[in-house]
Image (cartoon, rainbow, N blue to C red):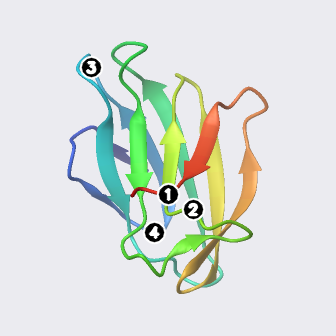
Amino acid sequence: MTTASTAGTTIGPLGVTVLASTSTGGPVEMTLATPKVGYEKTLLVRTIGSTSSFFYIDMPTSDTTILGTTADRIALNTTGDALTLFGYTTSLWLVKARSSTATVAFSTST
């Protein structure tokens, strides 16, 4: 398990990453590494500084997306959000599970 809290951080493609931020000035943007085929990645939001502060998790390249979408960005907006991804190919993440109360959004970064 790793913890990520700093904008500009690259999050590894394996295991669990706990996201924690005390920022109150807008989103904290991070990059998710390229998927490893056959492996899971779980993102868990432990703390968010304010309602205007949330996590943007961007894909490493424009060719990497969430399967079934054109999304290259994940937004995690609430403390307790959890999202598990599965490396389907080296350029596709599959959403395997998300917490029932998760306010997770998928979008394009441009």
Q: Nearer the viewer, residue 31 or 86?
A: 31
Can you identify the residue that label 1 sits on? 108
Question: Given contact means CB atoms under 8 Å apart, are the residues at marks 2 and 1 in contact?
Answer: yes
Q: The residue under label 2 is which amino acid type? A: Ala
Question: Given contact means CB atoms under 8 Å apart, are the residues at marks 2 and 4 in contact?
Answer: no
Q: The residue under label 4 is which amino acid type? A: Pro
Can you identify the residue that label 4 sits on? 13
| Cα separation between marks 3 and 1 | 25 Å
| Cα separation between marks 2 and 1 | 5 Å
Q: The residue under label 1 is which amino acid type? A: Thr
SS label for mark 1: loop
Can you identify the residue that label 2 sits on? 71
| Cα separation between marks 4 and 1 | 20 Å
Q: Which callout, 3 or 2, points at the residue further toward the start of the chain?
A: 3
Residue 90 vs residue 1: left or right?
A: right
Percent x, y for residue 35?
51, 77
Percent x, y for residue 93?
61, 71
Q: Which callout, 2 or 1, points at the residue further toward the start of the chain?
A: 2
Above or below, 4 against 32 in this view is above
Mark number for residue 22? 3
Disc 2 versus disc 4: nearer the observer: 2
Residue 1 vs residue 43: left or right?
A: left
Q: Which callout, 4 or 1, points at the residue further toward the start of the chain?
A: 4
Percent x, y for residue 7?
22, 43
Residue 8 vs residue 99: left or right?
A: left
Mark number for residue 36? none
SS label for mark 2: loop
